[in-house]
Image (tube, rainbow, N blue to C red):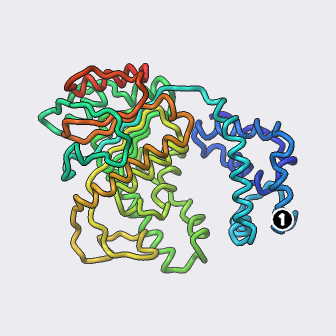
């Protein structure tokens, strides 16, 4: 990885500069795409136009920002609490947003275009047909598919162009080889995609079972012993709980990514599809992969819980039997598909040259969203043909 830029922010309001300075301190924990963003932002801030920070500079004294309450170059939990509790916080947030709205186009203009591919896979057990899938997405192009007799061959044929066991180099491996580490990701509930790639960044909810169980136990222990005063302190404590004895141990970036994803407090520890959705959104935001494959599954029915039990192993917390939730999975996934598509659209890297394939294992139709330059043959297509078109699109 590159070294953090050496920048002088004495001319930048302390509340604006603090977060940026904190990112530079954690430079080694940033993905290359994040490093590139902060390098571009820093270069812009060094030559920021006069008046860009005028409103924030005028607002800080009214908020009580002084050298004592907020020493320059610091961004701690105390500063976070200072902002959140400040009566002028909402006004400050509006001014910060206005600054980024002005900065954004300049930073986006420096991003080099590159073709990208996002594949979102649904489980074959969903109780709906093609007419009920992807209802929250734009119309796009619906393509008829000739599906293999064995459902287990679906992902291998699509991603590698060959079925098991004679797997070829996958789109993911080819992309990672051509564009570098962390440019290709698989994120799934099960383990089917693990066999389709060796070089991609691969996250599996099922494979993380031991780590998830350990996290739940540690959170419960911390809560019972009263070691922390609130959620922020809990978050700091949990930063020490990294994956171990797994393929992630050798990649500190991915290890921290997994820890932060599972402890986001939004159900990623408990719900397999929520993990896939949130991890995919965060991968798009942070790593900006050229090729992302998200594989959803069927989730279990959520058992009654509240408060801290969102971090608790439900199998131990309640005697209610575990049941698969087919309808609930379908309803959730309709929203999750939309989240992933909309999240990608927030970033300039995905706005013009990204192809989205929404597929379902065993389903004889897929939805294609993307530029007209992405061409598929007419008529019913074999998955090998779709693979070939994707490979040509990515030029790998």
The outermost residue toward the front is: 139
Image x and y of residue 163, in percent: 21, 29
Q: In the rendering, at what x and y percent does residue 137 appear?
A: 37, 44
Which one is in front, 234 or 340?
340
Quadrant of the image containing the N terminus: top right
- Residue 161, how many percent across, how many down? 27, 25
317 lies above or below 352: below
Residue 82 image-quadrant placement: bottom right
Q: Looking at the image, is 377 positioned above or below residue 238?
A: above
The residue identified by callout 1 is 65
Residue at horizontal 59 percent and vertical 26 percent from the top? 112
Say which quarter of the image contains residue 301: bottom left
The answer to which quarter of the image holds residue 355 is top left
| Residue 60 located left or right of residue 262 | right
Image height check: is 93 above or below 158?
A: below
Provide the secondary structure element on which disc 1 rests: loop
Query: Percent x, y for residue 269?
Result: 40, 61
Between residue 97 and residue 14, name the one nearer to us: 97
Can residue 381 be seen in the rendering of this structure? yes
Crowdedness near tag 1: few (<14), some (14–19) or many (≥20) residues, C-alpha within 10 Å: some
Residue that lies at the very extreme toward the left in this rendered image: 149
Residue found 51% across the figure and 56% down from its top: 260
Report the number of discs.
Answer: 1
- The reply to whether residue 200 is visible in this rendering is no
381, 161: nearer the viewer: 381
Residue at 12 percent of width and 34 percent of height: 149
**Quadrant containing the C terminus in the rendered view:** top left
């Amino acid at each position: 990885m590159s070294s953090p830029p050496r920048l002088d922010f004495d001319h930048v309001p302390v509340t604006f500069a603090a977060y940026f300075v904190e990112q530079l301190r954690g430079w080694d924990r940033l993905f290359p795409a994040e490093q590139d963003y902060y390098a571009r932002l820093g270069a812009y801030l060094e030559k920021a136009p006069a008046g860009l920070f005028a409103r924030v500079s005028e607002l800080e004294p009214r908020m009580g920002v002084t050298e004592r309450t907020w020493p320059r170059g610091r961004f701690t939990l105390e500063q976070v609490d200072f902002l959140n509790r400040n009566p002028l916080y909402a006004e400050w947030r509006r001014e910060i947003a206005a600054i980024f709205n002005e900065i954004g186009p300049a930073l986006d203009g420096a991003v080099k275009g590159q073709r990208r591919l996002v594949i979102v896979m649904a489980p074959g057990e969903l109780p709906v047909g093609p007419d009920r899938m992807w209802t929250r997405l734009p119309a796009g192009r619906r393509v008829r598919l000739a599906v293999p007799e064995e459902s287990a061959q679906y992902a291998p044929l699509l991603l590698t162009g060959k079925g098991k066991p004679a797997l070829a180099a996958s789109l993911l491996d080819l992309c990672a080889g051509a564009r570098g580490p962390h440019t290709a990701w698989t994120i799934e509930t099960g383990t089917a995609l693990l066999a389709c790639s060796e070089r991609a960044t691969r996250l599996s909810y099922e494979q993380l079972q031991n780590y998830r169980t350990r996290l739940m136990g540690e959170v419960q222990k911390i809560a019972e012993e009263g070691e922390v005063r609130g959620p922020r302190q809990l978050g700091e404590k949990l930063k020490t709980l990294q994956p171990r004895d797994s393929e992630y141990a050798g990649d500190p970036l991915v290890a921290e990514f997994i820890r932060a994803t599972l402890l986001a407090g939004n159900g990623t520890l408990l719900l397999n599809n929520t993990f896939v959705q949130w991890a995919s959104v965060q991968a798009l935001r942070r790593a900006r992969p050229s090729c992302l494959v998200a594989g959803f599954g069927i989730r279990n029915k959520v058992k009654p819980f509240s408060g801290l039990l969102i971090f608790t192993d439900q199998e131990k917390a309640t005697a209610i039997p575990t049941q698969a939730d087919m309808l609930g999975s379908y309803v959730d996934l309709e929203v999750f598909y939309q989240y992933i598509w909309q999240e990608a659209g927030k970033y300039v890297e995905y706005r013009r040259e990204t192809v989205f394939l929404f597929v379902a294992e065993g389903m004889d139709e897929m939805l294609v969203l993307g530029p007209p330059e992405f061409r598929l043959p007419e008529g019913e297509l074999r998955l090998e043909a779709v693979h070939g078109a994707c490979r040509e699109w990515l030029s790998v």
